[in-house]
Image: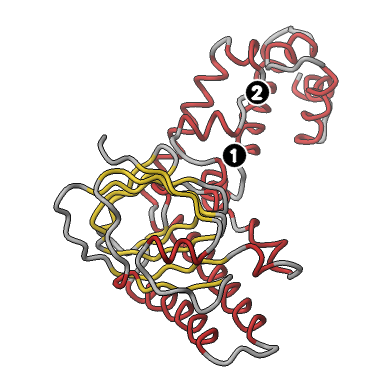
Amino acid sequence: MANVQFHKFTTISEFHQFRGLPKPEHPLISVIDLANVKAVPEGETSILLDFYSIALKRNFAGKLKYGQQQYDFDEGIMFFISPGQVFRIQVEKDTILNQSGWMLLVHPDFLWNTALQKTIRQFEFFDYSVHEALFLSEKEENTIAGIMQHIQHEYHSNIDGFSQNVMLAQLELLLTYSDRYYNRQFITRKISNHTILKQLEDILNDYFDNDIIAKNGLPTVQYVAERLNMSPNYLSGLLKVLTSQSTQQHIHEKLIDRAKEKLSITNLTVSQIAYQLGFEHPQSFSKLFKSKTNLSPLAFRSSFN
């Protein structure tokens, strides 16, 4: 594709300049009204930021690619990018820019030596792919936009000894609301979510029904997530809301079901069953089985018989 470009931004000031914006009023945190942003050059532009980006966009005239996914911004959505992650923007020729929304940029230095520095990466949506973006209602959009504007107002005012703490509190509130809205999204998308549960069950059944498990061991969370075209964190978050279990717990539950089946209807030894289920050491299998059932494999076999 023509006009492919790569841009890395180490400071928020550099990003402002690239997007045709005035110099930021605060070097480490900035709120941008996307209606004031100039168009990205025609073609595909890859961007790497050394700071956090939280964007609330609507009517973006182009496509954004994140990981292997692509998204059109015809709805009000949010997405979250951590320092060091690369995303790509594709703009067709003669595109008319009509985007709206807000973008919050936060440099890691703004969080230095604060409680939020330690907890921000615990918000799993920073690892989500863009097709797992957060869809917002109009009311939710207004809430998020309002918080961003409060942050902007704070650094517009005279900076004093309370300013950073006020902005940090607003940022943490924004992240907490986002966490709430993601959980709401997991619940309200029931049809598609239960389709995912069925697909998960099929993937695990296929894996355990073949020789794959004996050769490669237990399926990993990464393997299951890739088969479902999701990020591992998003999948585990979804499953926790729907079933109160993580992906790893679903894998272990399937394993225990198969182990119980083999213990109850075959004469295979515990070691043979362990090897068939992908364990290199039978002791590891026995330990996991007991942790899940409160019985050793032999005790389970005896109780069944």
Using a 10 Å C-alpha cutoff, classify the residue at mark 2 as few (fewer than 14 neighbours), some (14 to 19) or many (20 or more).
some
| Residue 165 in which image quadrant | bottom right
Identify the image quadrant of residue 286.
top right
Which residue lies at the image location 61% right of the left edge and 45% below the top edge? 245
Q: Is residue 36 above or below residue 91?
A: below
**Badge 1 is on which residue?**
247
Q: CA distance from mark 1 to mark 2?
A: 12 Å
Residue on which disc 2 sits: 218
Query: Is 104 or 279 nearer to us in this picture?
Result: 104
Residue 219 lies, in percent from the top left, at 61, 25
Q: Is residue 273 left or right of residue 224?
A: right
Considering every residue shown, the one lying at the far left of the view is 94
Amino acid marked by disc 2: Leu
Disc 2 secondary structure class: loop
In this view, 183 is above or below 197? below
81 with respect to 287 (left or right): left
The residue at 75%/8% (across/down) is: 272
Q: Quadrant of the N terminus?
A: top left
Q: Position of residue 177 (x, y in %)?
A: 52, 71
Using the rendered image of the protein, determine whether residue 125 is visible from the camera's viewpoint: no
The residue drawn where x is 74% and y is 7% is 268
Label 1's element?
Answer: helix
Q: Which percent across, then down, holds residue 66?
A: 42, 45
Q: Name the spot of residue 34 as percent of width and height, x first.
A: 34, 69
